[in-house]
Image (spheres, rainbow, N blue to C red):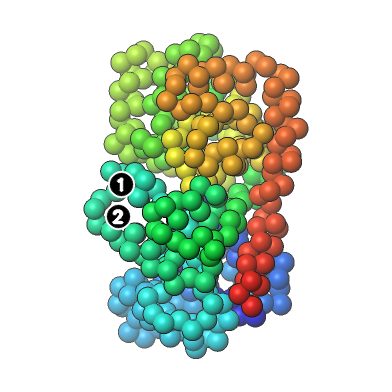
Amino acid sequence: MNVGFDAKRAFHNYAGLGNYSRLLIQSLSEQYSDNQYFLFTPGFTPHPLHSFAEKDNCKIITPKGIHKVLPSSFWRSFSMANEIKRQKIDIFHGLSGELPVSNLKVPKVVTIHDLIFMRYPDYYSAFDRKMYEKKFRYACKIADKIITISKQTADDCIKFLNADAKKIEIGYQSCDPIFSASVMDKTISKKYDLPEKFILNIGTMEARKNLLNLVKAMHFVEEDISLVAIGRRTFYTSVVEKFAKDTHISHRVKLMHNIPFQDFPSIYAAASAFVYPSVFEGFGIPVLEALTVGTPTATSNISSMPEVGGGAVLYFNPNHIEDIAYRISLLLHDKEIVKELNVNRLKQLEKFSINKIAEKTNEIYGLLGC
């Protein structure tokens, strides 16, 4: 079987969408090695994270001729379909919410990760909202199967895009295998001058991630515990910094940016606990990363977080400061609770193994006769 992927994110995104794409392609190509995998991307530059595409049954397809100089969006939306036909693709999978705008004659699958741009439109420009909605709505309409990475996203596709519920299959995502490695870099604390005892938070520093409430909760946590937050700066970061300064807690709040991905597992492992107070996630991959490393975790009791965390994490109301602080205290001091969470953790992680996710995806292909 010839499987085609819109693999733009696999080659050009080094966070959530890219990680999902790379891991899925790698696992499918290993577990179902008799298939041929065609990776359609508007451009390719060698990178250490591109090793997933080096297998004999993977072929990278890029624009040719005039399409090299035309906007890449034109090739992906319109001209890529001709190449899909030329390569005799049996099934095409859009890995990041898009499918070509053309009359593809092959079975089509699209993965929808989240509809945050519709739930929280104020976080996006009017142009981006309209563009995303148009692409996602079209993809859901023409796809033969829609994979959503959580039940939350499945519900949102039905609510916001009027997607056909019969088309939808829930296929969880996994986290990078580096989080499963048992080897920890013991020098990580020195490298980043990390506090001796700290709560960790990872995620883009934007209002939806709710970092400010976590900083507020630190006022109710003992003085010898600090907060380390890692993520891309936005305007919201300045709001957090100002609050920390105005309330005289800056010395206990360390904000870090541009940290190499390969250092994340060791930073998770060095933390006393991981706390993720986001008010909405399509999935919430940092929760899964923390569980994989084995860091005691607390997160919000809404959106997709309980789906990811199961019985392996503690939950709080993300809008209730004292509730956040109380769960932190339990993670730091209640050994019995932490022990129970750890027992549940191993069972919960089974749901998100990359092998199971590849198996589920291949099963979905099979439903389309492929």
| Residue that lies at the very extreme toward the bottom in this rendered image | 86
Tell me residue 146's x, y (percent). Answer: 52, 63
Residue type at numbered disc 1: Pro
Of residues 305 and 31, which is closer to you in this image? 305
Instruction: Please determine whether, in this image, residue 291 is positioned above or below residue 65.
Output: above
The image quadrant where one finds the C terminus is bottom right
Residue type at numbered disc 2: Arg
Of residues 69 and 369, which is closer to you in this image? 369
For the question of whether residue 218 can be seen, the reply is: no
Q: Residue at x 58, y 16 (%)?
A: 329
Of residues 322 and 186, which is closer to you in this image? 322
Give the quadrant of residue 211. Answer: top left
Tell me residue 224's x, y (percent). Answer: 54, 13
**Circle 1: element type:** helix
Instruction: Please determine whether, in this image, residue 156 is positioned above or below residue 84.
Output: above
**Circle 2: element type:** helix
Taking 11 as reference, is 175 left or right?
A: right
Q: Which residue is mark 1?
A: 121
Instruction: Please determine whether, in this image, residue 277 is positioned above or below residue 332.
Output: below
Q: Residue at x 30, y 55 (%)?
A: 129
Q: Mark on residue 65?
A: none
Q: Mark on residue 129?
A: 2
Q: Residue at x 63, y 64 (%)?
A: 361
The image quadrant where one finds the N terminus is bottom right
- Marks 2 and 1, the one that precedes in the sequence: 1
The crowd level at tag 1 (other Cα within 10 Å; few <14, some 14-19, many 20+) is few
Q: Are marks 2 and 1 in contact (CB under 8 Å)?
A: yes
